[in-house]
Structure formats: structure tokens, C-alpha cells
Amino acid sequence: MKKQILVTGGTGYIGSHTVVELQEKGYEVVIVDDLSNSSIDVLDAIGKITGLRPAFEQFDLSDSIKTNTFFDKYTDIEAIIHFAAFKAVGESVGKPLNYYRNNLNSLMNLLDNMKRRNIINMVFSSSCTVYGQPDVLPVVENTPRKQAESPYGNTKSICEDILRDCCKAYPQINCIALRYFNPIGAHPSSLIGELPLGVPNNLVPFITQTAAGLRDELSIFGDNYNTPDGTAIRDYINVVDLAKAHVIAINRLLNKKRTSNYEYFNIGTGEGYSVLQLVKTFIAVTGVNLAYKIVERRAGDIEKIWADTSIANNELGWKAETSLGDTLLSAWNWEKKVRGLGN
Ligand code: UD1
């Protein structure tokens, strides 16, 4: 019998790419998503790529009654990948309660059902935001976590604490937290990708929308950081490479290969790129010119971060494979597809 995996937030950006990779490896998927930041059309797109439209239930996982009812209905779930969460850093500063309520309650409702129903495996969507601005680079998994800059970031840190404590108290439960660096790009089919509502907060969607003519110019937030060209540095990870890390984590849990029942891994490329380097790479690989200007730093931004990925490479046998140029090209192809622009 096929192993059934619950993917929460499975119609979202990283979730949808992960569902594709899971189905392509023969897993049966059921998605739960409240569609608060994604579209039902993603199910058809996944169907087109993989030949299989996953099972889907629409509800908010921070509602404990609905979550319990879901688990009454789906009794063959062997593992959960938990993506569903609010993720807008800026918005979280103005609406902290929404973020704490949604992101913490949904995790606790899932864990409660895992404990009661003997579902023992979870992969959790964490973030490099838990490191804050680290003192030493690159960051390794045991680099001390710092106070997060935003309520959103703090929810990721608290969720990691909840998982650690639950794995200690309930030793039958096994969790892997994946700390993503900056996920970018889209599926090579251009059938799924990142589709932010309104004005994008994140760099790459803003770039592709500007290149597509939806925005006049990109604002680069600060050129006076302590970096070679003065712009901030991040570790940009291809979303399909990132999705594959989840399948590896699921295999690890199901095959009981872990070293402890709570593990956490950096999922990045191991290389830092500045905002200007990224912009120049985008222009070089797409041939599209991009208007940009330098403006003030964005509040809450850190100066630089990139991952040491040796533990993920050695323990998981996972490695980022796609170049920054190819990843930016995939993001551009997706934007063109969404906007109906030809090649
Ligand atoms: C943030 C979060 C990260 C979260 C991600 C997705 C932190 C420290 N990081 O990443 O955890 O997963 O959002 O929501 O909280 N930039 C510009 N112009 C723009 C947009 C961005 O110059 O119009 C710059 C930023 O200043 C930054 C870089 O591009 O240096 C990347 O920004 P962004 O894509 O927003 O991601 P992070 O802020 O790194």
C-alpha cells in the first residue's frame, strides 16, 4: 500500500513543489490548505505535472475541531509535512496576535492528533530567521539562535521549541525541522511557482514583476552594509531543490534512519549572493533590462547570512543542485507564463 503523507499548506509556494516531488516518488498525498494565500488551481497544475490530482481538504488548521474531524476521516496518514503558516514578515509586526494564533495553534493541533492517534512523523518548515544576525558565518545548525527580528520569525523559533519539547516528552514522535534559507524560482514546467498577492515583499517576485512591466523599478534596500558591494547578502535556494529535501526527510523518518527523534538541518546552497549580484545575474541570464534604484535600508533586515550545509549534505545526502542563473530563469519563465507574455 502507498504511504499517505499529509501536506499542510500544500497549495502554497513551497508546499506545491513538495507535493510534486512526493507524488513523483510514489507517495500518496493529501493536502490541507485554507487557501488564504494560494489558489485551488494549483491542484490542476500538480495534476498536469504528475498525472495525479492530490486529495484536498480546505480548512484552517488553527481550528482544533476541524483538525480533529479531518483526522477522524483520514486514518492512513504516516507522516505530516507542515508548511501551513502566515509568512509575511512586515505584516507580522502589525498583527502579532494573528501570527502567534495561527502559526502556533496549527502546529499544536497537529501534534495533539499525532500523539493521540499514533502518527509519529513530522517534517516542519522552519527558517534561517531563527539565527537572527549571526556573529559568525556561515551558520551551522548549532549556531546559537537569536531573538527573531519579527513576530513571524519568533513563531518559527517558538515552533522549534515546541517540537523539541514534544519530542522529549513523547519519545515515539519523530520530527525533522528544515531551516530554509531564501527559497526562489519555480518548477521547470512553469505550471507552479510563487504567486504573491498584491505588491511582493520578497526580492525575486518583485524583480520578475518589474521585468514583466507590472512595477516601474526595483528598490534595493540599502547599499551601505558591510559587504563587498554594500548590499545585503542571502543564500538563495532553488525551490525544487528545497522540495527534494522534504522527500529525503520523509524517507529518513519512515526508514527510521535518524540519529535523534528531533533533528534540524540547514537547507541552503552554502553560498551568499548580494542583492546587486542577484539583480545582475537576472539581467545576464534573461537578457531583460531591469530598472533599479538604491533606497534606505528596510527595517528589520539583517546584513548577511548564508548556510553551512555540510550536515545536510552528509547526514541527509542532500545537496542544492541548481545554479542561481537557472533558478532566476525559472522564476522569469513562470512570471511570463502567469502574465501571458511570450518567449
Ligand atoms: C524574509 C525572512 C525569511 C522568510 C522570507 C519569506 C527574515 C530575516 N527573513 O527573508 O525568514 O522566509 O522573508 O517571507 O525575517 N530586497 C530589496 N528590495 C526588495 C525586496 C527585498 O532590496 O524589493 C532585499 C532585502 O533587503 C534583502 C533581500 O532583498 O536583503 C532578500 O529579501 P526578501 O526576499 O524579502 O527575503 P528576506 O527578508 O531575506
Image (spheres, rainbow, N blue to C red):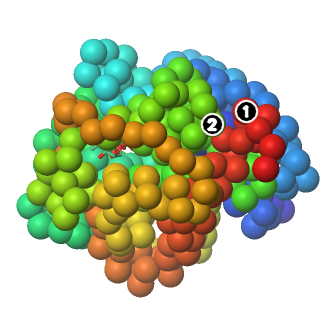
- The dot on residue 339 is 1
Residue type at mark 2: give it: Ala
Instruction: Identify the residue at the far left of this view.
Output: 135
Residue type at mark 1: give it: Arg
99 left or right of 56 in image: left
Q: 159 or 284, which lies in front?
A: 284
Q: Can residue 205 be seen? A: no
Q: 71 or 276, which lies in front?
A: 276
What separation in Å lies between label 2 and label 1 (alpha carbons)? 8 Å
Q: Are marks 2 and 1 in contact (CB under 8 Å)?
A: yes
Element under disc 2:
loop
- The dot on residue 256 is none
Residue, x 58% and y 62% (percent of image)?
285
Q: 219 or 313, which lies in front?
A: 219
Q: Tell me the residue that label 2 is attached to.
A: 212
Q: Residues within 10 Å of mark 1 (few under 14, many from 20)?
A: few
Q: Quadrant of ligand 1?
A: top left
